Image (cartoon, rainbow, N blue to C red):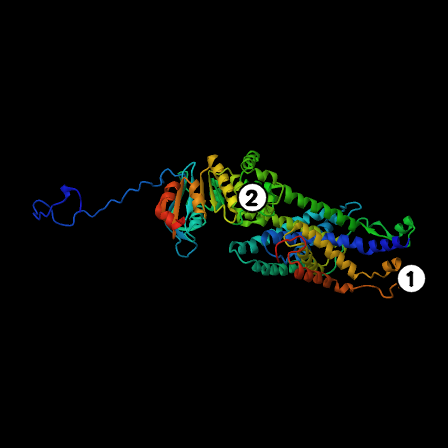
Amino acid sequence: MEPLNALVVLANFVLIPATAYGAQLALGALGVTLIYGILRFSNFAHGDTMAFGTMAVILATWGLQSLGVGFGVLPTALLALPVGIAVAAALTLGTDRLVYRFYRGRRAAPVIFVIASLGVMFVYNGLTRFVIGTDDQRFEDGERFIITAREFREMTGLAEGLALRTTQVITIVVAVIVVTALFWFLNRTRTGKSMRAYSDNEDLALLSGIDPERVVVITWLIVAALATVAGTLYGLDKSFKPFTYFQLLLPIFAAAIVGGLGSPLGAIAGGFVIAFAEVTITYPLKRVLGYLMPESLEPDGLVQLLSTDYKFAVSFAILLIVLLFRPTGLFAGKAV
Amino acid sequence: MSQNPYADDRGNKDASITKPGPGPTLHRGAIPAERPETQSAFLIGDQMTGGYGGGADILHDCTIAVDAGEIAVIVGPNGAGKSTAMKAVFGMLDLRKGSVRLDGQDITALSPQDRVKAGMGFVPQNNNIFTSMTVEENLEMGAFIRRDDIRSTMEQVYDLFPILRDKRRQPAGELSGGQRQQVAVGRALMTKPKVLMLDEPTAGVSPIVMDELFDRIIEVSRTGIPILMVEQNARQALNIADKGYVLVQGRNAYTGTGKALMEDDEVRRSFLGG
């Protein structure tokens, strides 16, 4: 029973949380990578786009709750998602009209776009705090657990419990649906292919009669949707706090770069690499090892490689390693 | 000394017989035996003068034309403005003088994208395929402006370039140089263009592949599409050309049928290496 208990502990504290977190990062990184591939710049405002979209979802959720509308065992926030996506899309499209289109018209260098996106980030940042405040907001409702730790222990008779939260399952299911839809769109539809063509070779796309402004608009729509979904899933799983979303920028960029900027498949792989590394390194493995190792070798300390306060160091370290040894990322996107 | 006795005064200074003075000076230029017919030309860049942006002029009164059903080739030494002339015809140059007409219509004011819609197919020299997309997707993107069924056109392209049919699910970036050029030409053919423009289609491919590409280009031409082509390999290009333009420093230096240019001593000495 010992190895089984070790596996349960590992699943409970590392595998399941990391998978959920990885799915959230992957969705975020997909947005970053799409902007990079098509508009050719690193969008630093992405974290705050997520925060803004999530804020809209939270407000809509509260509205629905006050009207007495619920989604049964599922969180009401899922019903509010379309509203949040619409608001975020209006925001990104408005920003594009106001800011990015101007620089596109001047054929500005990508670095100018990056700095402009930094400014946009601060504006979004302020907007979100202005509307919803800086505090933690909880908007999760419905059933909290699919399996609680005690139920699991009673069911299996193991010493260790395994809790499966509704939000974790929802995160994974929604992420799978969104990613499948996105890949179907990019690989099977005429518009999706035209976006890939534009990302591949702008001049030839123009020669083929692909309208760049249309591609840009659709990209922002997709990015707004991805950001809102990622932000809402993260908020449901943990909690919503504008500053946390700003901080998410680092693991998201790390994920996008590790996978290879501009490569959607890479963004997903990168998201899971970063999430698993972060969770594994900051989790005290003492109990897992305790079950696996003979008593004489059992570790005295916590075997926590890094305090959770330093979890961003993990993304940073992976980012550095990748940039040093494989700058194009795992899936060979565009060189960084 | 003229041989005509009637025009010669044979030393007679009598002003009542011959009128003193220099005589007529308006000289009618020699009529060249071989001259391009431009009025009926299907596509013509007429007396184009211009350069990039505000820079110096690269083209000077340069005229390039291609007739229906013909292959016209632009040759010349390095830096002669061959590719520039083709870009000018396609609307990528800032023209200060001259006009471009397609099928009798003045298209000088159209943007390159609109020229594609007007029926021009253009294959750039570099970056002429979508490397990350499959061969079939490349062809689909070529037909982006079309809303009708593209399958029959795709079949025609596959018939012209059978190797592409075998590789249609493969990313175009994984193909060899010659196959990439076939993808590029195929992509341009997908709009069912009225005229096809190729910018150095054989650049960077081996001699064997080059011969094959020329054969393919002749086949494309046999389907009735006029072709305007810039070529580095002047000899082979003029061999298949109905009409050749030799450009030197942005000016028309020699113009004639491919055969006539090949036989012209001066052209041979200067540009074809003897």
Q: Which of B267 and B201 is in front in this view?
A: B267
Mark seen at residue A295: 1
Mark seen at residue B179: 2
Q: Distance between the residues labelled 2 and 1?
A: 65 Å
Whole-percent x and y of residue A317?
71, 63
Residue type at the position of mark 2: Gln
Q: Which chain carries label 2?
A: B
Tell which residue pokes out farthest to the front in this image.
B274
In contact (CB < 8 Å): disc 2 and disc 1: no
Whole-percent x and y of residue B223?
48, 34
Q: Nearer the viewer, residue A92 or B246?
A: B246
Residue type at the position of mark 1: Glu
Q: Which residue: 44% across, 40% down? A: B240
Whole-percent x and y of residue A203?
53, 49
Is residue B97 in view from this perspective? no
Circle nearer the viewer, 2 or 1: 2
Q: Which residue: 83% across, 63% down? A: A303
Secondary structure at numbered mark 2: helix
Is residue A49 in view from this perspective? yes
Vertically, is B190 above or below A52? Answer: above
Whole-percent x and y of residue B68?
42, 36
- Quadrant position of the C terminus of chain A in the picture: bottom right
A71 to the left or right of A46: right
Q: Which of A6 and B145 is in front in this view?
A: A6
A97 to the left or right of A78: left
Q: How crowded is mark 1: few (under 14 residues within 10 Å), some or many (20 or more)?
A: few
Q: Nearer the viewer, residue A185 or B22?
A: B22
